[in-house]
Amino acid sequence: MPDPALSTLIPLDAIDPAEVERGLDLAFGPDRHGRTAYAIRQGTDWLPALSFAALDEQGVLVGTIQAWPVALADPAGRAYPLIMVGPLAILPDRQGRGFGRALMAAQAAAAIETIGNEGNGPLPQVLIGDAPYYGRFGFVEAPRGWTCPGPWDPARLLIRGVSAAVLPREGTLGPWLG
């Protein structure tokens, strides 16, 4: 099993976008655009400072992670900016080898530098994913009063880097266009 430490992590914008799309299709299927996470970040561009690619020891793309500007709109219409982490995509034949952990660590380190100490800066991070996997990176279940466009499992809506008292208990996630 290859050691992910032998991989190279580079900024995602150094990779051909068509190659990134092929990797995402392989990891999630070509119908991935219908997922709720895509609706949440619709109309936004991923954030280069928080998005990375993993290349194996031969320089082959094996995984990517992206981060996006999103917002939580409370019932009064106020918007609270957040960073949406994901997709974290590892090629199916490379999963379980540590590339995802390496990409999550790179994203977390960039978040510390970009949005605050240990990810506890002014912009919390949110994602839709498996709590047992992402919990090891500090993600916990988001407030049950939050909603998303489209279907989603509230137990899979996770947040990191914020005290529950800072954000409203109710709101809808969507793109941050402001």
Image (cartoon, rainbow, N blue to C red):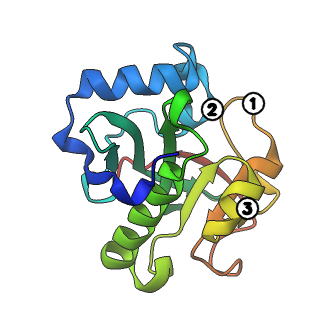
Residue 75 figure quarter: bottom right
Residue drawn at x 30%, y 54% is: 9
Between residue 126 and residue 22, name the one nearer to us.
Answer: 22
Q: Amino acid at mark 2?
A: Thr
Between residue 113 and residue 170, name the one nearer to us.
Answer: 113
Give the residue number, with chain letter if any, for mark 3. 142
Residue drawn at x 39%, y 78% is: 112
Between residue 143 and residue 114, name the one nearer to us.
Answer: 114
Report helix, strand or loop for mark 2. Answer: helix
* Residue 21 position in % (x across, y down): 36, 23
Give the residue number, with chain letter if any, for mark 1. 151
Label 2 neighbour load within 10 Å: few <14, some 14-19, many 20+: some
| Distance from the alpha carbon under mark 2 to that under mark 3 | 16 Å
Between residue 141 and residue 72, name the one nearer to us.
Answer: 141
Q: Amino acid at mark 1?
A: Pro
Drawn side of residue 57 relative to residue 67, left or right? left
Report the disc number at residue 36.
2
* Residue 57 position in % (x across, y down): 29, 45
Drawn side of residue 37 relative to residue 83, left or right? right
Q: Amino acid at mark 3?
A: Ala
Report helix, strand or loop for mark 1. Answer: loop
Specify which label sits upstream in the sequence, 2 or 3: 2
From where the camera sits, is residue 103 visible?
Answer: yes
Specify which label sits upstream in the sequence, 1 or 3: 3
